[in-house]
Amino acid sequence: MTSAAEPRPVVVEARCVTRVFVADLAVTAVDRISFTVAPGEFVAIEGPSGSGKSTLLHLLGGLDLATTGSVRFEGQDYAAMDDDTRSAVRRGGIGLLLPVVDLVASLTVWENVAITRLLGGQRLVGGRQRARELLDQLGLGHRADLVAGRLSAGEAQRAALARALFNRPRLLLLDEPTSSLDSVRADEVLGLLRQLADDGQAVVMATHNARAAAFADRSARLCDGRLVVP
């Protein structure tokens, strides 16, 4: 048991993070955000399109680097890592579900779920059982041997979630994870995320859906790149 005097564990922490994109004009997508997530927390990031939700998720996962401020995963600053190290950290500890589902159409569904093994220099076949277990959990066990190009949009989204869960990540980052699902499937997925958090995973979900956000422990609302106190 953690005593009151001990520091609260943190999986990911953003400290006064700003991200500015420069094209013809400078656009501040995330503006001076400080944010922490502990093990076992399920946090919803709410806000309309263009509010900075996706950019914040990218920063928390080390897919992008802050213009100013810092983001640390398990105490390690992403900015102090080279690209290969950040990629290795993501493979080892972070699961990502992004809006664009990039399954390999010519591979089977279970092979897509286990594909991170290839990136780690391992054989796909060693991940078959784990992939099938996850697909069963998500109602896709009967599609495991189908080539991924034949999945519906909702099925592909669930398969991509299974892939994000494959390495048992300590941090799970999800961008609109139920956008292609009907209400029944959406509740099943949200219930699974709730259970994962209860079992100790840190879960951060970007959503504009208040029903989805209700499954989380707490919500953070973004408006024009700024964190707004609910």
Image: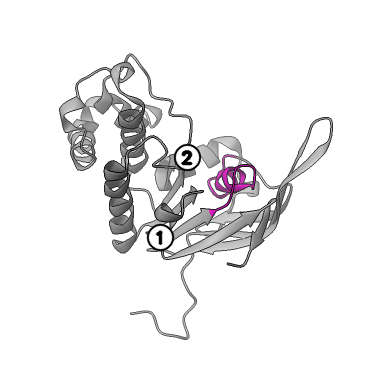
Q: Is residue 1 magenta?
A: no
Please say if 5 is above or below 109. below
| Res 221 visible | yes
As drawn, the label of residue 64 is none
Q: Nearer the viewer, residue 59 or 155?
A: 155
User: Mark 2 against mark 1, which lies toward the viewer?
Assistant: 1
Which class describes the residues within 10 Å of circle 1: few (<14), some (14-19), or many (20+)?
Answer: few
> What residue is rendered at 33% in x and 51% in y?
190
Is there a contact, CB below 8 Å, between mark 2 and mark 1? no
The x, y position of residue 215, in whole percent, is 37, 59
Q: Residue at x 38, y 32 (%)?
A: 120
In the displayed structure, does residue 143 sit left or right of residue 65? left
Q: Looking at the picture, tell me which residue is in the foreground, 34 or 228.
A: 228
Query: Which of pointers 2 and 1 lies earlier in the amino acid sequence?
Result: 2
Question: Is residue 114 in view?
Answer: no
Q: Going 35% across and 16% down the picture, which residue do you hit?
A: 105
| Residue 47 belongs to magenta span | yes
Give the left or right position of residue 198, taking residue 100 as reference.
Answer: left
Q: Residue at x 29, y 54 (%)?
A: 191
Residue extending farthest right: 24
Position above or below: 4 against 65 = below
Hey, what amino acid is under mark 1? Ala
Q: Which residues are magenta?
A: 46-63
* Residue 206 place in picture, x, y as percent: 50, 49
> Label 1 belongs to which residue?
214
At label 2, the amino acid type is Ala
Which image quarter is the C terminus in?
Answer: bottom right
Image location (x, y in percent) of residue 65: 65, 44
Q: Which residue is mark 2?
A: 88
Considering the numbered disc 1 on the image, is that residue within a helix, a strand or a loop? loop
